[in-house]
Image: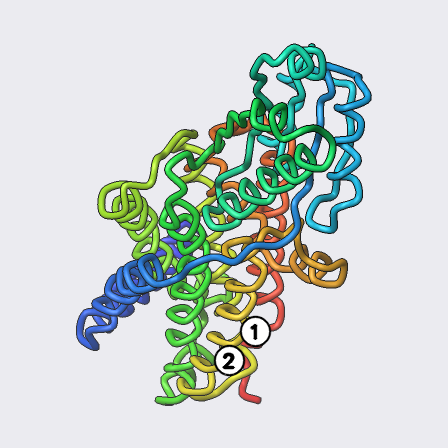
Amino acid sequence: MDDWSDAMKLGVVRAYMLKEIKELLRSKMIVLVYLLPTMIVILFGYGIRLEVTHARTVILDHDQSRLSRDLIGHFLHSKYFDTRVMNITEQQALHRIKQAKTEILLIIPEGFEKRLIQGVGTEIGVFVDGAFPIRGETMANYVEGVIFDAARRLMPPKEAKLITIDNRNLFNQAMRDENAIVPGLIGLILLVAPAILSALLIVKEKEEGTIFNFYSSPIKKSEFLLAKLFPAFVLHSVNIFLLFLWATWLFEVPFRGSFALYWFSAEIYVLISLGVGLLVSIITSTQIVATVLTIIITIIPGFLYSGMLMPISAMSAESVIEAHIYPVMYFNHIVYDTFLVGQGLASPKNQLYLAILLIYAVGLILLGSFLMKKELR
C-alpha cells in the first residue's frame, strides 16, 4: 500500500511538471527564457566600459641603492598607489596578483643605479593586472608617469633617458573590455533570469486562482516545489552552456580554467536564483509586482557588487561588507577565475566561495519551503 502511495505521489509530481512545461510552451515564456539572456549579454557586452579606481602596488627592490629608494619614495607618497615594498621572490609576487591581492608589481633590477651612472640603459619591470582593461591601462600609465617624473627630478636628463619600462599586462593581455564584461554578465544573467521565471510560475497560480488546487490536494509542499522549480532549473541549465558559447565564440573571451568548476558552480548559482524567486513569490500575489521586485533585488546588486564594473577590493569598507552579503560576488569570482586566470580548485578562495554558494542554495530553498504555507491566507 505504501509503495502504491509513493507511486501515486510520483505520478502527481510528474503530472505537475508536464503541466508546467506545456504552460511554458503555450505562453511562449520559454522563448523569453533564452531570448532575454542572449539580449543582455550582447547589449551589455558591447556597451559597458569600465572606470578606474585605486591600485595596490608591490615593489621588489633588487638594487637597494639610494636612487632606487628615492624612486620608491615617489610611489609611497603618491595618492594613486597603495604601495608595499616586500622582500619576496618574483614568483611569489606574481602569485599575489593571481590571488587578487596585488594589482601592480614593480621590479627594480640589481645594478640599477650603477648602470645609470655608467651611462648604460636599464629596464624596470612592471606587471599589471589587466583583467579590467581600462583600469589596467590607466594603472600602467600612472606607473610610467611616476617613474619618468621621478627620474627627471632625481637625475640629469641624459641619465633619465636611459630608463625604459618593460610593461606586461596579466590575464587580459589584449586589454579587451569584453574579457572583463562578458564573464561578469554571466553572473548577472544567471541571477536575474531564473529568479524571474521561478517567481512567475508560482505567482501565476495565485493570480489565476489555480493555487487552490494545491491547497486542496494531498501533494506535499516539497513535491509541489519540485514540480514547479525543476523545469525552470533544467531550462536555465541549458543557458549555462549557451552563455559559455556566446562568451567564447561570439566575444572570443579566453577560457583558461576548469569547465567542470564553471558548470558546477553555475548550477548551484541557478539554484540560488530559483530560491530568490521562490521567496519573492511567497510575499507577492501578482505577476507584475513579482517581476518588478525580483528585478530590483537582483539587477541592482548584480551590477554594483559583482566585481564587473569595479573590483570589490577598490570599494569602500561599507560597500565591501554589502558585496559579501550577495551571492553574485562569490560566483563571479569563480567565473573570472575560470575564464581569465585558471587557478581552479587549487585556489583556497575558490574552494571557500564554492562552499558559500552551496550554503546559499540550500538555505534559500529550505527557507522558501518553510515560509510557503499550504493553506488559504
Circles 1, 2 touching at the beta carbon (< 8 Å): no
Q: In front here: 136 or 244?
A: 136
Identify residue for label 1: 372
Q: On the picture, is 244 further left or further right than 334?
A: left
Residue ID at (19%, 73%): 28
Q: Position of residue 257 (x, y in %)?
A: 43, 30
Can you say which quadrant of the picture contains the C terminus?
Answer: bottom right
Which comes sooner in the sequence, label 1 or label 2? Answer: 2
Residue 83, by quadrant, is top right
Return the x and y of residue 136 as percentages of the image width and height: 52, 43
Above or below — where is 262 with respect to 273? above
- Say what secondary structure mark 2 lies in: helix
Judging by the rendered image, the residue that carries numbered circle 2 is: 293
- Could you say which is closer to the camera, residue 260 or residue 51? 51
Q: Residue at x 63, y 23 (%)?
A: 159
Residue occupying image coordinates x 34% and y 35%? 254
Q: CA distance from mark 1 to mark 2?
A: 18 Å
Give the side of residue 36 with respect to residue 196, left or right.
left
